[in-house]
Image (spheres, rainbow, N blue to C red):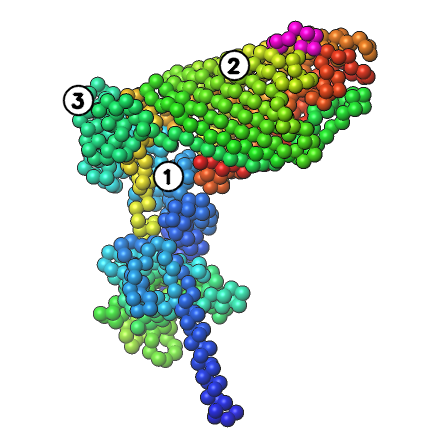
Amino acid sequence: MDRRCRFRLLWLLLVVGLCAARAGAQTEVGTVAAVQGTLQVQRAGAWQTGSVGAPIFVGDRLRTGANDAAKIVFRDDSVLDVAPKSELTVDKQAFNPEARRFDTLLRIVKGKVRAWVSEYYRQPRARYEIETPTAIAGVRGTEFLVLYDPDREVTDIVGLTETVDVAGKLGVLGAGVQVGPRLLSRVEKGRFPTAPRLLDDAQLGQYLSGLEIIGTGRPNGLNVQHAAASGQLLAPQDLPSTAALPAAAGAVHPGAPSGFLADRLSPDIATNTQPLLDYQNTPPGVVPVGGVQVGF
Amino acid sequence: MRLAGRLVVVAIVSALIATLSLRPAWANVRSQALYARGLVAFDRGQWEQAYALFDRAVAADTLDAVALYYRGLTLARLKQYAAATRDIEHALQLNPALPHATLDLGIAYFDDGQYTQARTWLERAHQQGIERFTAAFFLGLTCYRTGDDPGAVKYLTEAEADPDLRPSAHYYAGLALFRQGKTEAARTAMQQVMREQPQSEIGKAAQGAVGGAPAAGAAARQKPWSLYGEVGFQYDTNVVLAPSDAGVKVAEGITKQADGRAVIGLGGAYQLLNNAVGSLTAEYDFYQSIHFNLTQFDLQGHRLRFDALAPPGKWSYGLSAMYDFYALDYQSFFQEGLGTPWISLNESDTAATQVYYTLRARDFFREPYRPARNGINNAAGIRQYFNLGTLGPGDWLLDFGYQFDAETTLNNGLDARDFQNIGNQGDIDLHVPLYWLMHLQVAYLFRLEDYQYPNSRSGPGVGQPFGFRRHDNESQFGVALRRSLTENVSAEIAYLGVINDSNISDFQYDRGIVAGSVRVTF
């Protein structure tokens, strides 16, 4: 292969690669399921508000303020809770069940997330990783929590169920640890992960604080848009002129008697009660010919 | 080595904790994903879809209190209050600290009409300070519903602190004050409602009360009309009512003929009046069946109905009047008018007894029934209604009754005497709400008909008619399963069996009908 040919091949690969990257970047990989306060999403350089139901794409950067939190559900059935004062990017999400290709990379710039990693990642070659400037946490179908403090350049990884593989970002292999449920491993800049240590209830509660996102983040209670609170009458008889005690809902207060089930199902049944064809052959009052039997 | 040993101990302890205690504390991953997707549907108001997702989330992790709570909230939006309260209560047992759930449970019980339970939970929410003014508002409404007017005024006055709740709190406090005879205070409350929300239902109702508007509250009532459309298919094993007896079949040349038919129903109702005296509703229904083969049995029905109803109380009463017109094979068949005055004694919220009388006049347009079958029917009946309580997702309702009726033909000819009869019938009907928004109805009816004169097709021998009086006994048994597909659409499948036994073999027949339909209601 001459130099010119090699150059053309390289150029072609570059174009194909760019196209693939662009196609990947446009793929909707998740949906915002809950937002407390405001979730900001940076896409194509511009920040916008991400509300419930909004799509998440590869390349999106997510940010929460001091009183904000969010829940994202990904197409691979993984869920991510984003705590207040957090920022992260969705760097990669390959999800192809036919090809058994599952590959997710989230990068935390600051703050805390809790990940619920789906069972797809239990398969061989599947990879789910959350990366911070000091650590990489990888799992195979489990729940865990990652906190990165950019001021101290420290990453805390807490296992919630099963185990998380934690490694430092030293540019060298080895010295990773496995973090099980209720265990914490800390990774400082330029250091290996610490040996996991057990968290007591108070410590665990502290790590989970800010991640208890219940509901969509908007008021979801039954008082919201309740007829009673929106200027509607709860019952037609709720009038000043008829301020009498109304019946409880579900109470047995029958109206006009209704017919039997047959009447409701079809007038064909209810109206056809005498043998019409028989009467057409032999009208009432006319003596029938043949073998009418009498007696039960 | 010491470090390794410590790690082993830590790993064993953590594994034990995970196995024994931690698992229920966090919903599993599958449950979380389903719950999160359910939230998206919930936020969009897609209640059926949200219910399905939360239901699967709960199935994936039965201890997921939040998914259970949201399934309950969704069920309440679908007006499945019994199931909703059960879910929210269960969620609270799993996680007593679930924010807002105590208040929601109280509201769900209120919407279900279970005011004792509602009051318990709303008081708890009020004491806990969970949206205190909202809790006070619903507590006030609960007090109003149960006749505790001082309590209603107290809580509703507290709820007025919330600007969003203020107009409704003023209005219902006004109603409670009216009931207490504190007219001036009530008028003041109503005037506030008029100022705050003049265009709302309560604003117009308040205007009617204070300003003496001619139709007090009439403009403020809820949607006065409803419409429906229905299409279905029925398979009928014996459209022609051919006799079961083989000998008669041959002699009469009529054999059992099964056929399918498409059925179409359309109709609507409009509430003409609704005031302190009562309500009056007009209704029109259209029906058409189209047989695949036996087209001479295509039936078209038109029904005009009026229902007058007194306001509910210990006693309730009303009058139902109907006019029916039927065409068979697209030619006039018969017309009838019916009037049914009725009165019910509502012994409690779970039991009622009803008596009624029905007068029916029928006029046939064509041979062979005209004029022989033209007649007047007088019927009187008594029914008992019971709410059996909540079993499964809702209340089971049972009703049964007895009816006596007498059919008197208007023509004095021998042919007319064939139709003059006395009827006695009893029936029982059970309504069972099921999971998955389904509803089951099971019914059975037994009817005796004693004809008053010897029948023209019976006799000691051929050519010697009028030998015996006709006696029929008929059994009808049916089962119908309905499912709500959306808020406006429901589907139903049903089976109805009829066995008519008679001492005269011409009238012995049986038939079975399988029916399926889809109904759209607005």
Q: Relative to B49, is A183 above or below?
A: below
How far across and how far down the image is residue B143, in percent? 27, 27
Q: Quadrant of residue B270?
A: top left
Residue drawn at the location 29% of the way across and 77% of the way down: A190
Label 2 sits on what residue type? Answer: Thr
The magenta segment: B407-416
Residue B331 seen in the current view: yes
How far across and how far down the image is residue B5, in percent? 37, 68
Which residue occupies the extreme bottom position in the image? A2
In the image: residue B273, left or right of residue B357: left
Q: Distance between the residues labelled 3 and 1?
A: 42 Å
Q: Relative to B396, is A222 above or below?
A: below
Disc 1 residue crowd, few under 14, some 14–19, many 20+, Cα 10 Å:
many
Q: Earlier in the sequence, mark 3 or mark 1?
A: 1
According to the picture, the residue beneath numbered tag 2 turns out to be B358
Residue B444 seen in the current view: no
**Same chain letter for marks 3 and 1:** yes
Chain designation of label 3? B
Residue drawn at the location 35% of the way across and 42% of the way down: B92
**Mark toward the viewer: 2 or 1:** 2
